[in-house]
């Protein structure tokens, strides 16, 4: 222990790299899948924006239910590999197959109703495997480390390794899907998506051998389903935080969906130029992630998170003013990227703190239950974000079959891309002011929690010896 309010915690580098690889692989598959699917089915396959919007709303029901369901199941899992590893290891090939099937509909794409039904099906199926694996990759920092410093270090590794993932996730689809006249299924695009699916599933599988979880938790008697939900909703810091996450996720979803329309119809870029807007955002994320990790140590995660939200909101507002040409949009895109760099590293740390707070209250460790309830609260934001953008551009006259859009439609794209996200992000910043887990008292509670974990680990090893397992 280095001081009264600090303790030394060090994770092995191989564990940090493994987590970064697993998180990046999952983010690539889910990121490409959920970001590009609207544009792909709308512009490339010709499904109307109205039907796609309806598909997202229908999907929102399952999207809300499956996360708390699988989160509860994963927290109750007992196996010789632990609670988390089996899902990463054996879910990887399923993740790959369903990812590929997004881009290769098993129906006649000229039949609009069949394509609509298939879209609903693939949203349900793909999100299920994403949920099973994503709940774990999202919550693992809370399980692999307890100090904000080491969690930040773990997430710096994850973000830096994720540099490749961000390029693949957000640059490659824009490069492959925008700027061309062709529609329908492109064999080259399918081959590239297949390679990505196989590679990411292999990374997930291999990484599972180097990631640790709290095996001692398997000795604890878990809360019943109803009690688990009740106790989660009694966690006031968690509810405050999730309000900010919901609003921020609406904004992020709109950005990831609208960027295709922005590049293709507003800036009218093609080839290498088409990737410049998203590449600028990504470069800023990686340029500033280390800076924000240091600011967290100096000012605390709450203040740094609020700063990131404000920067992102101002970036969106300025994009409405400056974003009509690439030369002036650069300033706004850089500002958005800096703000998102902050959010990328702070969100999972704050989530982990709310899980720690729950353990202080209940004596139970319930990372994926919390991930599931978080999704119950926030995942409808994905459907809401897509619906808000699609309904906005439809009301302003967007025509999915037209390569050149009217001035009204272009204005609708800009309004949906900038002002709507800005409102949601700035709401997040205001709400976060009321978040209470901050300051010396909270650090002292985390110190006590670390001692409890050390004692539980000793009891678990004793149990294994008594069972003859070690």
Image (cartoon, grey):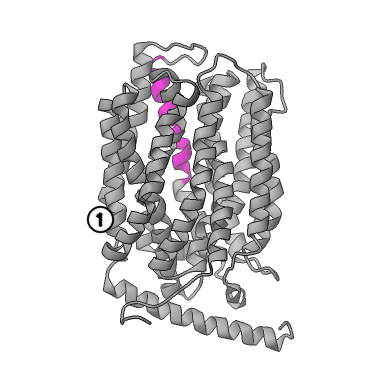
The answer to which of 267 and 72 lies nearer the viewer is: 267
On the rendered structure, is 330 left or right of 198? left
Give neighbour class at mark 1: few <14, some 14-19, many 20+ (Cα, 10 Å): few
The answer to which of 75 and 279 lies nearer the viewer is: 279
Asked if the stretch drawn in magenta spans residue 363, the answer is: no
The picture quadrant where one finds residue 457 is bottom right
Residue in the picture at 40% in, 31% down:
277
| Most frequent secondary structure within the magenta stretch | helix
The answer to which of 17 and 60 lies nearer the viewer is: 17
| Residue 467 locus on image (x, y percent) | 72, 85
| Residue 227 locus on image (x, y percent) | 51, 66
| Residue 448 locus on image (x, y percent) | 40, 80
Q: Is residue 152 above or below residue 32?
A: below
| Residue 451 locus on image (x, y percent) | 45, 82
Residue in the picture at 60% in, 17% down:
183
Asked if the stretch drawn in magenta spans residue 384, the answer is: yes
Residue in the picture at 59% in, 77% down:
216
The residue wearing badge 1 is 433
* Label 1: which secondary element: loop
The picture quadrant where one finds residue 316 is top left
Q: Is residue 163 above or below residue 349?
A: above
Residue in the picture at 34% in, 77% down:
6
- Quarter that holds the C terminus: bottom right
Residue 294 seen in this snapshot: yes
Q: Which residues are magenta?
A: 379-397
């Amino acid at each position: 222990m280095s001081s009264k309010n600090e303790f030394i915690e060090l994770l092995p580098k191989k564990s940090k790299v493994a987590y970064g690889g697993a998180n990046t692989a999952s983010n690539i598959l889910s990121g490409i899948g959920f970001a590009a699917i609207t544009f792909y089915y709308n512009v490339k396959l010709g499904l109307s924006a109205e039907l796609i919007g309806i598909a997202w709303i229908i999907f929102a029901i399952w999207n809300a239910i499956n996360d708390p369901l699988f989160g509860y199941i994963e927290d109750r899992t007992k196996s010789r590999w632990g609670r988390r590893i089996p899902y990463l290891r054996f879910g990887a090939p399923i993740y790959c197959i369903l990812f590929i099937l997004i881009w290769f509909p098993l129906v006649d794409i000229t039949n609009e109703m069949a394509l609509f039904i298939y879209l609903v099906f693939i949203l349900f199926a793909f999100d299920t495997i994403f949920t099973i694996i994503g709940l774990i990759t999202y919550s693992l920092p809370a399980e692999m480390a307890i100090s904000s410093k080491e969690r930040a270090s773990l997430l710096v590794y994850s973000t830096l390794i994720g540099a490749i993932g961000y390029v693949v996730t957000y640059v490659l689809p824009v490069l492959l899907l925008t700027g061309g006249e062709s529609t329908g299924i492109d064999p080259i695009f399918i081959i590239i998506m297949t390679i990505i699916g196989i590679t990411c599933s292999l990374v997930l599988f291999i990484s599972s051998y180097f990631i640790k979880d709290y095996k001692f938790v398997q000795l604890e008697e878990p809360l019943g389903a109803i009690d688990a939900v009740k106790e989660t909703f009694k966690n006031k810091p968690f509810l405050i935080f999730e309000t900010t996450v919901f609003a921020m996720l609406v904004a992020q979803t709109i950005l990831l969906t609208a960027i295709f329309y922005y590049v293709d119809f507003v800036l009218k870029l093609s080839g290498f130029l088409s990737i410049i807007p998203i590449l600028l955002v990504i470069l800023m994320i990686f340029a500033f992630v280390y800076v924000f990790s240091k600011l967290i140590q100096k000012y605390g995660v709450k203040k740094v998170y609020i700063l990131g939200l404000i920067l992102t909101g101002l970036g969106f507002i300025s994009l409405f003013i400056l974003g009509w040409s690439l030369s002036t949009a650069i300033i706004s895109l850089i500002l958005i990227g800096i703000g998102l760099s902050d959010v990328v590293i702070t969100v999972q740390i704050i989530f982990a703190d709310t899980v720690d707070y729950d353990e202080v209250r209940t004596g139970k460790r319930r990372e994926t239950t919390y991930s599931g309830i978080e999704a119950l609260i926030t995942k409808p934001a994905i459907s809401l974000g897509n619906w808000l953008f699609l309904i906005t551009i439809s009301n302003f006259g967007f025509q999915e079959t037209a390569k050149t859009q009217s001035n009204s439609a272009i204005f609708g794209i800009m309004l949906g891309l900038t002002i709507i996200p800005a409102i949601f992000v700035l709401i997040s910043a205001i709400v976060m002011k009321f978040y209470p887990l901050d300051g010396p008292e909270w650090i002292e509670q985390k110190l006590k929690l670390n001692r409890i974990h050390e004692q539980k680990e000793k009891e678990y090893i004793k149990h294994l010896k008594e069972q003859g397992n070690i």
